[in-house]
Amino acid sequence: MKTVAYHNLGCKVNSYEMDAMLQSLQQHGYQIVPFEERADIYIVNTCTVTNIADRKSRQMLHRAKKTNPAGIVVAVGCYVQSDTQALEADTAVDLLIGNNKKKDLVEILEAYMAGRSQESVIDISHTSEYEEMQITSTAEHTRAYIKIQDGCNQFCTYCMIPYARGRVRCRAQESVLEEIRGLVSAGYKEFVLTGIHISSYGMEELLSLVQAMDAVKGVERIRLGSLEPRIVTEDFVKKLSAVRHLCPHFHLSLQSGCDSVLKRMNRHYTAEEYQKGVSLLRRFFDNPAITTDVIVGFPGETEQEFDITRNFVETVGFYEMHIFKYSKRRGTKAAVMPDQVPEEVKTHRSNVLQAIELRDSKAFRASYIGKNVEVLFEEKKRIGDRAYWIGHTRTYVKVACEAQDKTLENQLASGKISGFLQDDILLY
């Protein structure tokens, strides 16, 4: 029996695809071992969203080869697509498998071991095929991420993803529901719809899918992955608010609160349109969690433009912000734009927004003190000298309950929040 070690980098789509690949390997008789161990085969599911992601991908590939020079090191995914030639020349890498070929991992791997060549990296920009994969379990035991879509047609000027993932392809609703029914049978209660750009699934199609999921017996919670602000219309939000098991937790990508920067980014909305979407969500949902992504130091971003973004995020009041310093990506339009912002300026701006994020995030959590909340408990954890069960509310606020004799894993329970256990954990 051959042993396989793996390391996954990047987004929840990558995590889903890694789970599917591991499932296929196990079904074909391979034994999965920790990445630190000496294995026959090493699989690194790469990411290319930033320069740092590229570097981490290379580091993990080289670490694998160092652990076992005789092992087969397999680079898979987005970095393979974005820089195939560099990886072909890398002596630490034995086999490349691109996107839309992950489902064929075992077949490609066994052909390689038998000395046969097989197409393993395609021209991703010219495929319309959705790569069908299904999972029966995940690394998490209570929450399952479900991939419903791949690819992106937006071509934001800073982003490599359309080149690494190709154009938009969507998964059939019945395939999604079949997978969810199987996971419900395995005990999963919460489902997160994810993809590279799930708004491209279509407003009506996404709504129909969520409504169909809501009718599946055993589905207790439904979450949506990152949404484009343009999909947040009054009709869409009103219909979503009628979906019983939908969690009031929405991630709307912002990137900048300044219209001139948004235009240079090729984002297809204004700050005013974004704010209208947030207002709609707050009108139809009671105190929803609104989270976002923000890029600081985009080429040409002046102090005045940054101040506009800072004022905007303070006005919105996000539950959480994921703040990124702009990273130049070779092959994108932004990489050759004039007036690249110095690294120290990016760091300062990031720190300013991080301070706002910490303040607003704590205030959102504090708003639950004294209120009854429903929590889906996920894991037991020791904090200080006591054991606690840790889980999340419907708005994805982390909550702890002191452990008693009975297990709470994968159980829904309600209780009153008494205060903070730690900065990011409430207690009841």
Image (cartoon, rainbow, N blue to C red):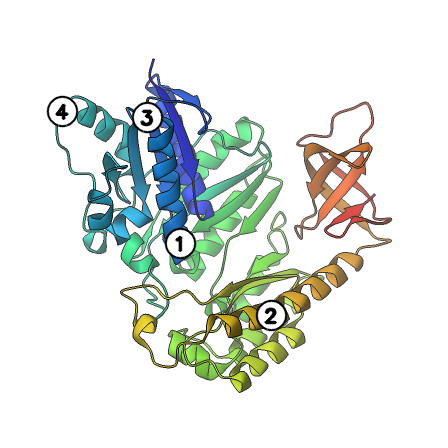
Nearer the N terminus, badge 3 or badge 2? 3
Expressed as whole percent of the image width and height from the top left, the position of residue 17 reads 39, 39
The quadrant holding residue 16 is top left
For this rendering, which residue is in front, 106 or 333? 333
Nearer the N terminus, badge 4 or badge 1? 4
Which quadrant is the N terminus positioned in?
top left
Q: Amino acid at mark 1?
A: Ile
Expressed as whole percent of the image width and height from the top left, the position of residue 82 reads 27, 53
**Which residue position holds label 1?**
196
Look at the image and tell me whether residue 245 can be seen. yes
Q: Which label number is shown at residue 115?
A: 4
Mark 4–mark 1 Cα distance, whole angstroms, equals: 34 Å
> Which SS class for mark 4?
loop
Nearer the N terminus, badge 2 or badge 4? 4
> Which SS class for mark 1?
loop
Disc nearest the viewer among 4 and 1: 4
Nearer the N terminus, badge 1 or badge 2? 1
Expressed as whole percent of the image width and height from the top left, the position of residue 213 reads 52, 44
Mark 3–mark 2 Cα distance, whole angstroms, equals: 47 Å
**Which residue position holds label 3?**
41
For this rendering, which residue is in front, 252 or 57? 57
Disc nearest the viewer among 1 and 2: 1
Mark 3 in CB contact with mark 4 (< 8 angstroms): no
Residue for point 72% across, 65% down: 359
Mark 2–mark 4 Cα distance, whole angstroms, equals: 56 Å
Q: Amino acid at mark 2?
A: Val
For this rendering, which residue is in front, 76 or 169? 76
Q: Residues within 10 Å of mark 2 (few under 14, many from 20)?
A: some
Q: Amino acid at mark 4?
A: Gly
Q: Amino acid at mark 3?
A: Ile
